[in-house]
Structure formats: C-alpha cells, structure tokens
Image (cartoon, grey):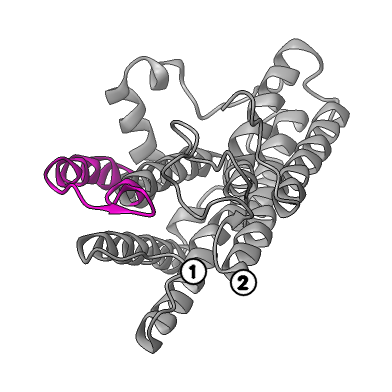
Amino acid sequence: MTTLAPTAPAVALASPAALLRELFRREPLFAATALLLVLAIVPIFAAGLVDPRLFNGVPIWEKPLKFAIALAVYMATLAWFAGWLPKGTTTKRWYRWYSAIVVICIAGEMAWIGGAAANGTGSHFNVATPAMSVIYGLMGAFAVTLTSASLVYGILIHRNGANGLSPAFRLSVSSGLVLTFVLTVLVAGFMSSNGGHWVGGNPSDAEAAALMGWARDGGDLRVAHFFATHAMHFIPAFGLVSALLFSATDRRPVMAFAALFTAFSLYTFFEALAGRPFLPGLL
C-alpha cells in the first residue's frame, strides 16, 4: 500500500522537541537556520519594546520581526520536505554548496533588514543613495536565490517516485514548491520595479489591516506576495486532505486546486494593480 509520508513517523508530531529532532534528521542545516531565526525573534521583539521609532507609520522593528518569522517557517518547511528528496541528495557536494549559499542569502537578508531598522531607515525599495541602490539590487538577487530552493526541491521531489508518497500528494508538494518560486518571483519582481507595494491610497502602513498590515484604502501587492510564498503550504495541505478523503492516486483534484490557487493569487495581484484593497469590509 502506498503511504503518504513514509519518512514521517507519528512521533515526529508528538511534541515540539520531537518535531525539531525530525527536522534536524532530515536537513540539519535548514533546521538549524530555522531554529536560529526563531531565537532571533526574542532580541528583535525586545528591540521593538525599547525603540519607539516608527517607519511608514508602524514600529520600525516590525519588518525584521515578520521576516524572521516568515523565513523560519520557510526553512522549517524545506527541512521537512527534504525527507522526500531522492535518497542521498543532502549529502551530495552540489547540494551542500547550494544549501550553504541559500543560508548565506538568508543571513544577508536578515542583516540588511535588521541593520536598516537599527539605522532608522527602510530596507525595501530604498534607492535614496547610490550605495543603497547597489545593496537593494544585491538583496534582490539574494531573495531570488533563497526562493529558488523551493523550485529545486519541487523538481527533485516530482522526479523521485521512490519516496513512497502517493501520486496525488507528491504532485501537491512538488507543484506547491514550484509555484512558490514562480509566483513569488513574478510578484516580488513587479513590486521591486514598482518602487513599493502600494497602488493608490495613502502610502503609509499606519491605517493598515490588523495582523497582516495590508492596505485598506488602496491596492497592496503584498497580498499576492503572501499567497505566492505560501503555495508550498496551501497546495500540499489540500493534497493531503484529498489523498486521505478521496483517492490517493487521482491527481486531478490536486491539479484543479493548483490551477485555482494560481488563478486566485493572480486575481489578488491584478486587484492590487487596480488600486482595490483586499477584503476591505473584513480586514
């Protein structure tokens, strides 16, 4: 009988400690990076408590905090998915070099974002000086590089028919990973060329929606960016439910959901371009 996740013993989810041990077993470098990012939340949060400065109407340490959380989730997810890569992948020389470069890019991004906050200035879209323009371009390259890990993982898992995953679930994981890269590069690349995430409305986050911080009086490209980067979570989650409740071999529901999710992400993108806020009556 084909299983959904042969390398995921039930004990792995029994406690945070057991989950952490499983992540380290699957991909030690990415798991360690995720753990360090989680630990970094503490000093970043403390900095926000003692530093009252604002940037674009919100606490200046809010962006480093959000990025630490987002990148920790990204690294932990990849560490988990590493269990479904072709056997021996994580020990190959090319992979060790590549994974180290991904982690270096993440460290560079966090140093840049945190350093900008400490200096009271913005990190993203900051081209006020020639030096900042160069750094911003370099960080853009870093962002594409670290996001490319989802593409690499998606291709390798798709090709690995020996990982024991059901056809439907394997497709959901691989397509979610690939779409994370494709959609994120599309949306983030446009945001970079646009010079910001606002389209119409007041260019300030002071009156933004709670929690997510999305604009309520105009378009906000960060909505599409959010859904793009989380394709690697939404689509596999659907694939798992579909395989458990329906057929583990029928890939059509996963293909349909992936198409719908892509269409929805693009809808939020074009909605923002039209200057319309996302769910204005609810957020």
Query: What residue is rendered at 24% in x and 65% in y?
Result: 115
Q: In the rendering, at what x and y percent does residue 251 appear?
A: 84, 31
| Secondary structure at numbered mark 2 | helix
Local crowd at mark 1 within 10 Å, few (<14), some, or many (≥20)?
few
Relative to the observer, which residue lies in front, 203 or 49? 203
- The residue carrying pointer 2 sits among few (fewer than 14), some (14 to 19) or many (20 or more) residues within 10 Å by Cα, namely few
Which numbered tag is attached to residue 160?
Answer: none
Residue 247 is drawn in which quadrant? top right
Range drawn in magenta: 34-63
How far from the left and from the top, in percent, is residue 126? 42, 72
Residue 132 placement (x, y as % from top left) = 37, 80
276 inside magenta stretch: no
In this rendered view, identify the residue nearer to me: 144 or 25.
144
Which quarter of the picture shows residue 193?
bottom right
Q: Position of residue 125 (x, y in %)?
A: 47, 68
Q: Give the mark nearer the N terminus: 1 vs 2.
A: 1
**Type of amino acid at the residue the image marks with label 2:** Ser
- Looking at the image, which residue is at 32% across and 17% down? 15
- Give the labeled residue for mark 1: 94
Q: Is residue 198 left or right of residue 123?
A: right
Q: Is residue 9 above or below residue 38?
A: above
The amino acid at mark 1 is Trp
Q: CA distance from mark 1 to mark 2?
A: 32 Å
